[in-house]
Image (cartoon, helix red, strand yellow):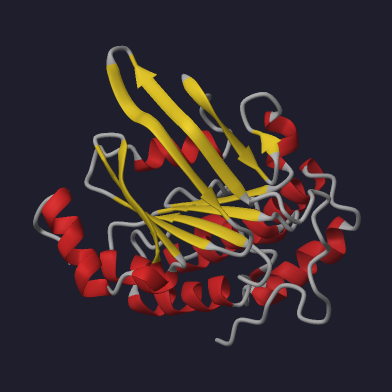
Amino acid sequence: MSAPSVSPEKPRPASAAPHDVPALRAKALSRHFGTRKAVDRVSFELPRGAFLSVFGPNGAGKTTLLRMLSTLSRPTEGSAWVMGVDVKEEPDAARDHIGLISHQPMIYPDLSAEENLMLYAQLYGVADPAARVSELLEAVGLRHRRLDPVRTFSRGMTQRVAIARALVHDPDVVFLDEPYSGLDPHAVDIFDELIASNRADRTFVMVSHDLRKGFDMCTHALVLAKGRVVTFDERSSIDFDRFRQLYRDTVGMGVA
């Protein structure tokens, strides 16, 4: 399947945020669970249009970091901004800029693909929800299954609905938490095409256990260990072999 971009005939509308405002900024961002510091004073800045891959072993704080950045979890300390909006002080306003895709699709299985997308489009106040949903179903190749309950879909098809859900309000920043988990090779290829076709003028942040794939997709790479930043680099400044060795030296063996 060829994956057209969601709006191939026109560029995405410019964000209301000043152009010099970064897409994403974290300053001493922390999340504590009792005495355990799941995320410990993480700071970085990401320009618009970048693709950040976040790596680290299990328990490093990757998903917790994503949950804070996407307003699903409130930071214990520190601050973060999405398109200049403070995620802690203005979470509702920040959500207007955010899309989220994870290994849990956040789709209602008994509703059809069309009903799911209409629900989210209406929740986000999309101006013409029917037209937007039709456009997205075409883009993800599911127009012919639009009236079928999502519970009848394969894992790969369900993830395509999840992509459409995440893009329904045309967000500036899309967070992906292990989005390839459980996908077969064909579904991975389709997912790759959909992400690639929607990268223009959009910022992505992806948590990944696949060092090679995550590195190849990114413009920036961040490694976490025990909740702290081990390294944050532009991909252009380091080749994969050096990056993999750095990861092994600082985080541990068993890296693909």
Q: Is residue 76 above or below residue 227?
A: above
Closer to us: 164 or 217: 217
| Residue drawn at (28%, 71%) of the image | 212
Closer to us: 108 or 256: 256
| Residue positioned most to the left | 253
| Residue drawn at (90%, 54%) of the image | 127
Task: Please indicate whether residue 191 sits to the left or right of residue 243 in the image.
Answer: right
Closer to us: 161 or 20: 20
| Residue positioned most to the right | 127
Residue 82 picture quarter:
top right
Q: Is residue 100 above or below residue 241?
A: above
Question: Percent position (x, y) of residue 179?
Answer: 43, 58
| Residue drawn at (28%, 57%) of the image | 209
| Residue drawn at (72%, 47%) of the image | 120
Question: Percent position (x, y) of residue 199?
Answer: 61, 70
Q: Is residue 127 above or below residue 49?
A: above
Looking at the image, can residue 162 be seen?
Answer: yes
